Image (tube, rainbow, N blue to C red):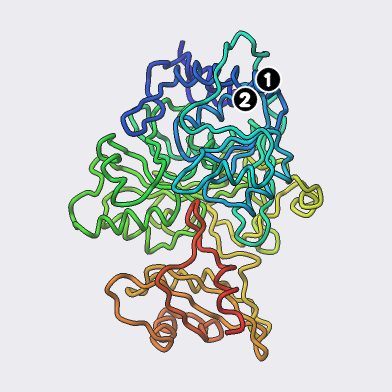
Amino acid sequence: MTETPHALSSSRTLWELLARRAALTPGRPLFLQDDRVLTFGALRTRAERVAAGLYGMGVRPGTVVAWQLPTRIETALLSFALARLGAVQTPVIPFHRDREVGFALRESKAEFFAVPGVWRGFDHTEMARRLGARGVFEAYDDLPDGDPSVLPPPPSDGTAVRWIYWTSGTTSDPKGVLHTDRSLLAGGSCLAHALRPSADDVGSIAFPYAHIGGPDYTVMLLLYGFPAVLFEQFALPDALEAYRRHGVTLAGGSTAFYSMFLAEQRKQPGVPVVPSLRLLAGGGAPKPPELYDDVISEMGVQLTHGYGMTEVPMITMGAPDDTPELLATTEGRPPEGMEIRIVDGEVRLRGEAVCRGYLDPGQTAEAFDEDGFLRTGDLGRLTQTGHLVLTGRLKDVIIRKGENISAQEIEDLLHRHPAVGDVAVIGLPDAARGELVCAVVEQRPGAGALTLAAVTAFLRAEGLSVHKLPERLEVVEALPRGETLRKVLKYKLRERYAGT
């Protein structure tokens, strides 16, 4: 029995994809964690037993089950068990606390809630009880178990909403994003076919499995039949031993991950930080061209960056055979089936990987235009080669004296400054100008103190228009970041500096 990855991507449901892969290569490893190995065949067999245990607890097709679990083999088993049952699952990032978790439980009307117990010093079970969650059970080491003979047939409709993901909450309340098995399969297929992995590769999941990237990455593993190392807690340099021991060839997650690997490489220039590594890949946040150049020249590995969001897990991706200039300056090309339309500078999307909308019908109506394209809120343009260049956010445009200023344009230039480790440019209220431009800088270790005069002189030399120059500089030890893909939380910076 032989099937190509492209043939496997025609699977209607996530469970069907697993079943087909398990039949092809049952004994090949899928997930590696510490000294444990879970094969493709074992995932199918064990997930069915967990599904039977959940069925005995009262979980049925369509039952809403929330889970807030770290990146572990057991988490993948539970998720696939729920997929086998055809339940509606709503993953919650394990770092979230009462406000975000309570919101997700209320909005999704979850009937069951799986938690890790006490994890990293925090009692999730107690929080669940405090929030009045229904059907609370711990699923860190021990999972429900039962006889698969009691199970109903696997789901066959891949277009039913079976996933509720939550936006990162970088503004106020998160939004419940509705996905189907087919939309997640489409996103994962796009990622896989863009990166072109082989069965000899070893990947890595160093971000929360509860993130939309969890199924995205797992679909790639199922399509191409190679394993990934799971990291319950990711920190460098501690994680490097596992990368080296398992011979990881594909790593990444987001821009922040590239920077962390690069910082480790700089401790021993010329000595590969992970000898087996051949490719860094990810998305979720802008990638300064200078970071691409540094990774290539100092680490000696390829870097392919993409563009995705909770609503559309894979929109574009750089390909290994793109030119260095395109890999450095664009987010890659959309895969077949993803339509990109630029309307008044805004990127809009239509395709199978696009979510079905939001839990709130009003939010859904606002998010899609009359032609069914999702309004992303991102600004960008398409090159003649079909590659996408992101230029900022609609809400990240600073309006100074009636002139629109792209925060990302200034950030990209400041990343070239040798003293700048990372930077966020924000607009702050100003009576005379409407908004003023403020650069918040996280300096590189050992760099001399930055001044506003030095920053503006540097930007002038880089050719930035005078009306875009920052009028304020704040130097911080660390920019505030989200816990998933380490995005900078600009709203926290606006709250901190507005009115000061």
**Disc 2 vs disc 1: Cβ atoms closer than 8 Å?**
yes
- Give the class, few, some or many, for how many residues have Cα within 10 Å of label 2's Cα (few <14, many ≥20): many
Query: Picture quarter containing residue 136?
Result: top right
In the image, residue 368 above or below residue 336: below
Q: Which residue is painted at 46% across and 39% down in the image?
A: 71
Task: Check the picture and name the quadrant holding the C terminus.
Answer: bottom right
* Crowdedness near tag 1: few (<14), some (14–19) or many (≥20) residues, C-alpha within 10 Å: some
**Residue 485: x %, y % from top left:** 49, 52
Disc 2 element: loop
Q: Percent x, y for residue 177?
A: 68, 45
- Label 2 – label 1 distance at C-alpha: 7 Å
- In the image, which disc is placed on residue 187? none
Left or right of residue 197, residue 191 in this image = right
Q: Which residue is mark 2?
A: 13
Q: Position of residue 335 (x, y in %)?
A: 56, 41
- Tell me: 363 left or right of 114: right
Type of amino acid at the residue the image marks with label 2 = Thr
Residue 156 marker: 1
- Residue 499's place in the image compared with 124, above or below, is below
Q: Is residue 159 above or below residue 337?
A: above
Query: Image quarter for residue 343?
Result: bottom right
Q: Residue furthest bottom?
A: 432
| Residue 134 visible from this viewpoint | yes
